[in-house]
Image (spheres, grey):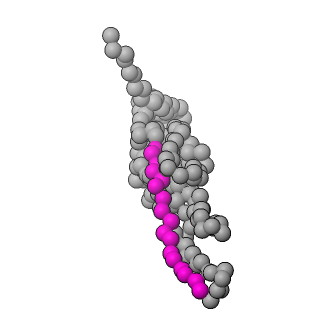
Amino acid sequence: MITPAGVYTAPADMPSPATVQVTATSHADSTKSGTGTLAITSDIALALTPIRQAWELGATQSFQATVTSSGHLDTSIRWSLLGPACAKGCGTVDASGNYTAPRALPSPASTTLTAQSVADPSKQISIVVAITSSFSLQLSAPSSVLAGGTTTIVATMTPFRVRIQAPR
């Protein structure tokens, strides 16, 4: 937007292309005019937390993207996941940045989580999220079974537990 006094206000979200052509025409002589081009720039910076980058199968984590800028801007974020395993399942991320790891281990066991500024799509921050599978699987069965007989085999999955001890 430009006022009759020549004060230009750039849009809050970056246009594409990020340039505007401004033309001023004389009121006294409409055949006289001048044209200039303005580049619209952005000082948007993004930060992403938490920085931990490994998640167990099925785990959920809320990520926060912080948008900073000296201007009054749109702080909206577009979240996405990208990677070779995403076609089969590398987890999900919602519009609020809540990531849920898949329930089955993909191959490769990682994805790239990206937070992208809606105001300036050229500004984004990404981390590689490793998807881990930390459990043991044990089978319990008799050592033999008669020909034609039946038996029960029990599979037990035990998650590994990480214990953190407070300093004494």
- Residue 150 in the image: state x and y as whole percent: 54, 35
Q: Left or right: 162 with respect to 30?
A: left
The residue shown at (50%, 44%) is: 66
The residue shown at (58%, 83%) is: 33
Residue 110 shown in magenta: no
Q: Left or right: 117 with respect to 134?
A: right
Q: Quadrant of the C terminus?
A: top left
For the residue pair 130 and 46, the one nearer the viewer reads as 46
The residue shown at (56%, 57%) is: 119
For the residue pair 13 and 85, the one nearer the viewer reads as 13
Q: What residue range appears in magenta?
A: 32-48
The residue shown at (62%, 81%) is: 26
For the residue pair 2 and 114, the one nearer the viewer reads as 2
The residue most toward the top is 168
- Residue 36 in the image: state x and y as whole percent: 51, 77
- Residue 162 in the image: state x and y as whole percent: 40, 26
Up-down relation of residue 138 to residue 24 (above or below): above
Which secondary structure dominates the residues rendered in magenta? strand
The residue most toward the bottom is 31
Residue 35 shown in magenta: yes
